[in-house]
Amino acid sequence: MASLFGQAHLSCLKEDYQELAHLLYQIAEVDGRFRDLYVN
């Protein structure tokens, strides 16, 4: 997760917003899986 946030930050700095959107989607997927496994 931390790696994805780091990559998202770098994409933002490069103004690569399509890559940023893709990474944010991946972060949301990982977050959803984490919640399904450990929170519920």
Image (spheres, rainbow, N blue to C red):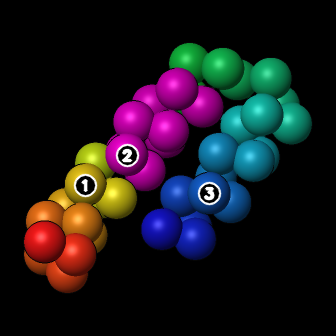
Image side of residue 33 versus residue 25, left or right: left
Residue on which disc 1 sits: 32
39 versus 25 height, above or below: below
Q: Residue at x 77, y 34 (%)?
A: 12
Quadrant including the C terminus: bottom left
Image side of residue 26 versus residue 34, left or right: right
For mark 1, does the 10 Å Cα neighbourhood hold few (<14), some (14 to 19), or many (20 or more) residues? Answer: few
Residue on which disc 3 sits: 5
For mark 2, does the 10 Å Cα neighbourhood hold few (<14), some (14 to 19), or many (20 or more) residues? Answer: few
- Residue at the front extreme, as displayed: 40
Q: Number of callouts in the render?
A: 3
* For the residues bearing labels 2 and 1, Cβ distance under 8 angstroms: yes
Residue on which disc 2 sits: 28
Query: At which x and y percent is residue 30?
Result: 31, 58
Residue range of the region highlighted in magenta in the rendering: 20-28
Residue 39 vs residue 10, the one in the foreground: 39
Secondary element under disc 3, as helix, strand or loop, is helix
Q: Mark 1 vs mark 3: which is more N-terminal?
A: 3
Q: Residue at x 70, y 23 (%)?
A: 16
Q: CA distance from mark 2 to mark 3?
A: 11 Å
Q: Mark 2 vs mark 3: which is more N-terminal?
A: 3
* For the residues bearing labels 2 and 3, Cβ distance under 8 angstroms: no
Secondary element under disc 2, as helix, strand or loop, is helix
Q: Main secondary structure of the magenta part?
A: helix
Residue 39 vs residue 13, the one in the foreground: 39
